[in-house]
Image (spheres, grey):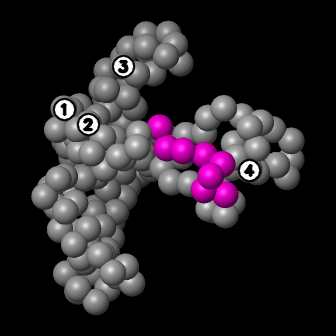
């Protein structure tokens, strides 16, 4: 892709066949006829996946240099606790029905609670073990890694009990 090119426009113009993105890129919104979603009913597919596997796929990870974690072994745990406190604060806003500017914001939030429980993206190693093992399995199946490995190898030992 050349510098300055926009992947969303490349898709709409037929220069690329597909794009993986959690939502349409901003540039694509003006051209809704230029693309389609892989699954016509995204929500139904998300719920099906969650019910089949028991987790919602990981979207983000926090990375810390191992040398820093080894020097400050309390840091990985404290980062996890900090992110958990921030997430609780953010989720707390949904208790205020006036928080969202979306007409159906509260209804959609209640639907999410019914479909995915109180926290579709839990923090911590134990809560994400199955998700991580699935990720390693996908990586091996797609030949991105030469062999599967224990997911503990991805995390500092101080976080294994989180």
**Residue at (31%, 26%) from the top-left corner?**
134
| Residues at discs 2 and 3 in contact (Cβ within 8 Å) | no
- The reply to whether residue 10 is in sight is no
Q: Secondary structure at mark 3?
A: helix
Q: Position of residue 16 (x, y in %)?
A: 71, 34
Q: Which residue is mark 3?
A: 137
- Label 3 and label 1: CA atoms lie apart by 16 Å
Q: Which mark is residue 49?
A: 2
- Dot 1 alpha-carbon crowd within 10 angstroms: few under 14, some 14 to 19, many 20 or more: few
Residue 75: which disc? none
Q: Which residue is mark 4?
A: 9
Tell me if mark 2 has few (under 14), some (14-19) or many (20+) residues whose alpha carbon lies within 10 angstroms of its own: some
Residue on which the image places disc 1: 52
**Is 136 positioned to the left or the right of 106 in the image?**
right
Quarter holding the N terminus is top right
Which mark lies nearer to you, 2 or 3?
Answer: 2
Q: In the image, residue 108 lies at what x, y percent? A: 26, 68
Q: Contact, CB < 8 Å: mark 2 with mark 4?
A: no
Range shown magenta:
31-38
User: Helix, strand, or loop for circle 2?
Assistant: helix
Tags 3 and 4 touching, CB below 8 Å: no
Contact (Cβ within 8 Å) of mark 1 with mark 2 = yes
Q: Nearer the viewer, mark 3 or mark 1?
A: 1
Residue at figure coordinates x 82%, y 49% from the top left: 5
């Amino acid at each position: 892709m050349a510098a300055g090119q926009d992947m969303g426009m490349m898709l709409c113009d037929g220069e690329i066949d597909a794009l993986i993105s959690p939502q349409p890129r901003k540039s694509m919104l003006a051209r809704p006829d230029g693309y389609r979603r892989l699954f016509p009913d995204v929500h139904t597919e998300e719920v099906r996946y969650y019910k089949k596997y028991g987790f919602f796929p990981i979207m983000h990870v926090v990375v810390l240099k191992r040398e820093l974690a080894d020097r400050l072994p309390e840091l990985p745990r404290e980062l996890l606790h900090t992110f958990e406190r921030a997430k609780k604060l953010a989720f707390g806003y949904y208790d205020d029905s006036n928080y969202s500017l979306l007409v159906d914001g509260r209804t959609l939030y209640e639907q999410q609670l019914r479909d995915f429980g109180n926290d579709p993206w839990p923090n911590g190693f134990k809560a994400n073990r199955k998700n991580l093992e699935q990720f390693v399995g996908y990586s091996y199946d797609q030949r991105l890694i030469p062999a599967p490995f224990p997911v503990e190898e991805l995390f500092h030992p101080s976080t294994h009990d989180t």
